[in-house]
Image (cartoon, rainbow, N blue to C red):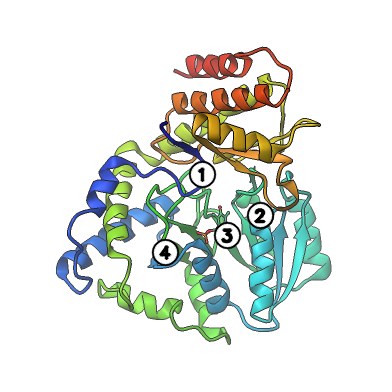
Amino acid sequence: MKATNFAPGPTPVPDRVVQKMSEPVLTHRSSEFSDLLRQVTADLKHVFQTKNDVLVLTASGSGAMEAAVVNLLSPGDRVLAVCGGKFGGRWIELCETFGLDALPFDVEWGRAADPDEIDRVLEEKGPFEAVLATHSETSTGVLHDIKVLGRVARSHGCYFIVDAISGLGANELRTDDWHVDIALTGSQKALMIPPGLAFISVSERAWQGIERSALPSYYLNLKRAKDSFEKGLTPYTPAVSLLMGLAESLGMMKEIGLEEIYRIHERNARVTRAGVAALGLELFARRPSNVLTSVLMPPGIDGSALLKTIKEDRGVTIANGMEHYRGKAIRIAHLGYDIAPSDMLVAISALEHGLSRHGYEFETGTGIAAAQRVILETS
Ligand SMILES: *Cc1c(COP(=O)(O)O)cnc(C)c1O
């Protein structure tokens, strides 16, 4: 049975990228490698929509989250972190690990942070050193309004740090225009290469802040990385094969164009939402990201059992809800520039299969038909 994956990362790796990664490994102290590093850095800046530094770390996305905290902040710093899902919560865990005074700005799961409310908290409970947020909250499928949050954070003189691990390269994120001091992502989401690399952009303002940070760092030290990158090097042996794949993937993204890539995600999201809604299911996210569609399970349907059936009978992987939404929500990803609308028909078909096997009443094909109509309307 052909296995198909609709989990929000690791995303399917395009064949061209797989081929590149199987070529002989470049020495990381060669001029070929320096050329490659300069090329990927330039291409990453475009994807990040920044003129500032973008550094590559050999780590998963969370490594870049840790790098942001330990390089820019100091023990005792007061920070405000938007928490409306598992990954917002990670900011709190990280900040507490390093002795920061982190205040969670709690948002009900499935909803987006209200920038006016954040403005009020920054005013009434401030001053804060930094605001930490999540672009696309992968645990709920919500897209936070980074543009407005950036304006609010800046108006209070705060650094603005954004976990864009699933969102960058799928939903618009204008790092410089939106006042994002540090944006970061990982390799295994919209960039469509295997896990193992993380990318982090640092604004001029953030570099000044980094000078004052009192937290120690070694492997994740960004100043050391910047010094090496300026010479076309990395401070330690990087995941060279992944960088070779990355160059190819970024090349493909350049061929398609960033605006078109956003449109691909938007279209796949619309197709999926239409299919789900036509089945009478409720969408979890009130402000949905184009990365994934989160769906609440109807009463009496156990999401975990449903996903097991879909996997066993159809070879299709759909992600479970996270933490207290495990079994209560499911998450269908449409993440990656290489995903076609017809791929989403496979997901909706598998969902119909699972729902039918678990006794949910609906007319067979309703979801697929609605999804198909959106494909036709947008062709
Ligand atoms: C996937 C993801 C992470 C975790 O990234 P790792 O690469 O597993 O460390 C963090 N935040 C968001 C929003 C994600 O989607």
Asked whether the beta carbons under mark 3 and mark 1 sit within 8 Å of each other, the answer is no
What residue sits right under mark 3 in the picture? 162
Q: Residue 124 appears at what percent x and percent y?
A: 84, 67
**How far apart in space, not on screen, are marks 3 and 1 (Cα)?**
13 Å
User: Disc 3 vs disc 4: which is toward the camera?
Assistant: 3
Residue located beneath label 2 in the image: 149
For residue 52, which numbered disc appears in the image? 4
- Quote the CA–CA distance across marks 1 and 2: 14 Å
Residue depicted at x 22% and y 67% = 34
Q: Are marks 3 and 2 in contact (CB under 8 Å)?
A: no
Q: Secondary structure at mark 1?
A: loop
Q: Could you say whether the residue bearing mark 2 is in a helix, strand or loop?
A: helix
Circle 3 or circle 2, nearest the eye: 3
Of the two numbered discs 4 and 2 on the same chain, state the one appearing first in sequence. Answer: 4
Amino acid bearing label 3: Val
What's under tag 4, amino acid-wise?
Asn
| Of callouts 3 and 1, the N-terminal one | 3
